[in-house]
Image: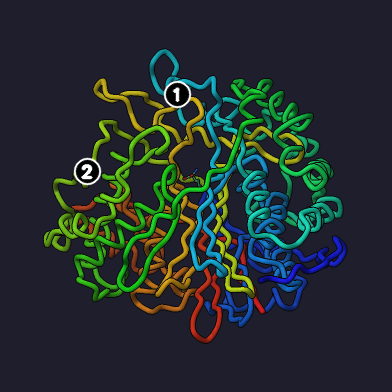
Amino acid sequence: MRPIPILTALALVSAPVFAQQATDAVPPEMTTDLSAPVADPGLRASQTAKAEGRSVEASNWMISAAHPLAVQAGADVLRAGGTAADAMVAAQAMLGLVEPQSSGLGGGGFLVYYDADLGEVFTLDGRETAPMDATPTLFQTEGEPMGFFEAVVGGLSVGVPGTPALMAGTHQRWGTIPWPDLLAPAINQAEAGFEVSARLAAMVGFDQDRLVLHPETSAYFLPEGAPLAAGDLLKNPKYAETLRLLADGGPQAFYEGPMAGLIMSAVLNAVQPGLLSEWDMRNYTIRERDAVCSAFQSYEVCGMGPPSSGAVAVGQILGLADAYYDGAMPDVSAETEVLTVWGNAGRLAFADRGRYLADSDFVPVPVTGLLDPAYLADRATEDMGTGALEDVTPGTPEFDHALLWADHVGRALPSTTHLSIVDQYGDALSLTSSIENAFGSRVMVGGFLLNNQLTDFSFRSHRDGVPIANRVEPGKRPRSSMSPTIVLEDGKPVLVIGSPGGSRIIGYVAETIWRVLGEGQDIQAAIAAPHAVNRFGTYDIEAGPGSEDRAAELEARGFKVSVRDLNSGLHGIVIGPDGLRGGADPRREGLAYGE
Ligand code: GLU
């Protein structure tokens, strides 16, 4: 049993640490300053390791997350004897402050937890839900789908947030440190202020035309009409107030009463009013779902099932490649032939994803059939290695009784966040958390942004007269690509991994698992390695040395190729026989840190 440490809120308050500057700013034409130091010596060592391409080592516990202040908040909790669940609460509360464009109280997420006491993996679905008044034509005007940003900005795209309930539910189940103590560091930081990172500043600058549309959003990100600049000290007293409310009243204080009222009125008064009601807010629940685990070599890759397509698609890509190579995995980026197999595996998986994946509370999803090794071996034909497969269609897995079709490939914009945590008790936590688009719906209330997660639904309700599986329906959860993953070997966790990146998340996560476990690469090297992602459209090859040549070779093999920046935000931890090793994505500003 874990001890229950007695901690005061004060003991958890970290010394101010200034943000490391981003290595990645999207839109891609923006460059960022990499030079600003972090103040804490431990974190500085992590930053140096990352800059030098080395992973970070530790023996007891570790956290890898998207911002140094969030890493610091989680690390303080882990050092004080907290569990991975406790550390997640502290880190997520901090991310909502320092990386507000990506995740926060107004969003949702999926959490995978390995409970070392029980030796079992659990998954919690904290996805946003559609209001009960939503209908399949929510994102249509005169029967035609709206433009994407037309739908995103304003109240219409806002689903009932899941993150506060997910934080509280995880804490209730696995936490040991008093809930208010875990929110204290973010409260203090919000009041003291934090340094705006180059990445946040670049994104505010890019998005100002949309941020200006809502008064609270505009006042916060464009004070006195000018976008925040890197290095500005930014205070968020409203966020501190909201967290205090949560600290005192628990999640109920968010889903009911004045806070719920504020959220609803922001949604109803936004540009393009939405449909949230008191009932929707009050009745939100996180759902515990069975972990979806698939076989990859000697490993079990466990993650989030529907409404996320993550675990099924990651499992399919790895399973198809594994079946093709019969277990002897070559280097995923070395050869054009391997990239041909990889690209076709992605196309086959995304064909099935488009056909079958949606919220399984509304649509039957043949998860078992889709991951059946015999089904995947059947689809992993020999011509996968010769060129782009000509005829890629969804398969017919066993238990296929879905008549409906999904569609809609998510549009990746630089948002969402992933954190991986291992505590000293052997528990592991993998959380991908999101407000969907960068700055979500752009509607801000109580110091945080509301999500636009409902635009992850299909905008069309039917295709060829047949209802689309991922269409909007009241109370339904939009299909996701988020792939928080814990990989097991002999029932014990060996890798905790995940990433933001819209539907490219699936490719990023599958690649990293292949590299680390299939090829034995170091976690930091695997995360930093160039990406190649095929979602059944263009084959996206990450711009960098050799990418144009590689693209030409793949084009000659029949793929449509796009060489571009690929803004993953992979954060991972390897749990090996001689300790923990962490990596953080050099494309973003996060760190791995452990002791
Ligand atoms: N909304 C996306 C999903 O749930 C995540 C967005 C992103 O990663 O940028 O799949």
Q: Is residue 316 left or right of residue 425?
A: left
Q: Which mark is residue 146?
A: 1
Q: Where the C terminus falls, by quadrant?
A: bottom right
Q: Residue at x 59, y 70 (%)?
A: 422
Indicate which label's residue lies in the foreground, 1 or 2: 2
State the CA–CA distance, disc 1 to disc 2.
27 Å
Q: Residue at x 61, y 27 (%)?
A: 280
Can residue 201 be seen in this snapshot? no
Can residue 308 be seen in this snapshot? yes
Q: Is mark 2 within 8 Å of ligand 1?
A: no
Q: Does residue 40 lie above or below 261 as drawn?
A: below
Please, what secondary structure does the residue beneath circle 2 have? loop
Badge 1 density bin: few <14, some 14–19, many ≥20, Cα 10 Å: some
Q: Is mark 1 within 8 Å of ligand 1?
A: no
Q: Does residue 79 lie above or below 135 as drawn?
A: below
- Which circle's residue, 1 or 2, is located before the other in the chain? 1
Q: Which mark is residue 394?
A: 2
Where residue 16 appears, as percent x and y from the top left, is: 81, 64
